[in-house]
Image (cartoon, rainbow, N blue to C red):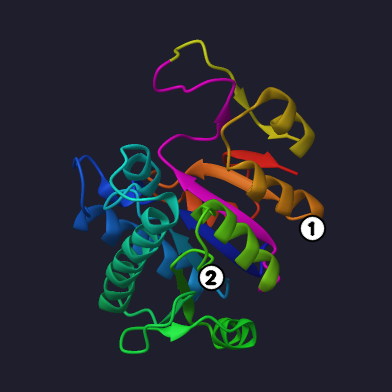
Amino acid sequence: MKYKRILLKLSGEAIMGKKEFGIDSDILEQYSLEIKEVSEAGVEVAVVIGGGNIFRGVQLSNGGMVDRAQADYMGMLATVINAMALQASLEKVGVFTRLLSAIKMEQICEPFIRRRAIRHLEKNRVVILGAGTGNPYFTTDTAASLRAVEIEADVILKGTRVDGIYTSDPEIDTDAVKFDNITFSEVYRLGLNVMDLTAITLCRENNLPIIVFNMNQPGNLMRLVQGNKVGTLVS
C-alpha cells in the first residue's frame, strides 16, 4: 500500500445520493464496503463527514433566522448525525469503529483527543471524526485538514461525485478540463473550489497532499491507497 494512514473527507451531499435531503442507505452501504476493503488491507482510516445533506448553516444565517455562529453549531450537530449513520453502517458490515466528537456528548461518542484517536487507528479501528473543529466559522474541509495534520495522515482523500479537479464545474460546463496534478499555488491563483482557503493553506504549510476523486466509482478508494492514478493530486 502506498499510504499507511489516510483521512477520507466525505461531504454530506455525497451520502444524500439522488435524494433532495437526508441519507441514502445504499450509498452509505457502498461507502462502508469500500472503507472495509482498505481497512482490512491494513490501511488506517479516519473519516470526516460534512452535514450539508441535513443542514446548511451558511444559507440559514444569510437568511437572517439565526446568527452565523449559532448556524454553524447547528451544522456541527448535523455532522454528528451523519457520523453516527456511517458508524452504524460500518459496524453492520463488520468494521470496528470509534466515533470522536469535537463537542462533548459522552452518551453517543468520545471526545476528540489526539493521542486517543491515533491509538484507535493503530488498533485498526476506523475513526470517525464528528462536529467539525468544534468552533464556528470553520468548515468541515478545515476540520479534515486540521485532523489529518494532527493524526499524521499521509494524505487527505476527498471523495466527491466527480473524478477530479476541473477548470470549472464539469456537471455544468462541458468544456471543463481536468487536472491530473496541480500545485497549491495554482489552486490559489486559479480560484479553484477544491477546499476552502483555510484548509488549503493548512495542507500547504504542512506539506500534506490532497487527492480529489470520485467516491461513487466502485474500487477507486482501493486503487488510490495502492498508489494507482485516480483523480487529481494537489501537492
Instruction: For residue 171, say whether it is visible.
Output: yes
Stretch in magenta: 151-172
Mark 2 neighbour class, 10 Å CA radius: few under 14, some 14 to 19, many 20 or more: many
Looking at the picture, does residue 151 appear above or below residue 30? below
Closer-to-camera residue (4/228): 4
Q: Is residue 153 magenta?
A: yes
Q: Residue furthest top?
A: 175
Looking at the picture, does residue 40 appear above or below residue 166? below
Q: Is residue 161 magenta?
A: yes
Looking at the picture, does residue 93 appear above or below residue 205? below
Q: Earlier in the sequence, mark 1 or mark 2?
A: 2
Closer-to-camera residue (98/60): 60
Instruction: Give the residue at mark 1.
Output: 206
Residue type at numbered disc 2 = Val
Image quarter of residue 187: top right
Could you tell me which residue is drawn at 73 percent across and 47 percent down?
Answer: 201
Could you tell me which residue is drawn at 40 percent across and 38 percent down?
Answer: 161
Image quarter of residue 19: top left
SS category of the residue bearing label 2: strand
Instruction: Give the residue at mark 2.
Output: 45
**Quarter the C terminus occupies:** top right
SS category of the residue bearing label 1: loop
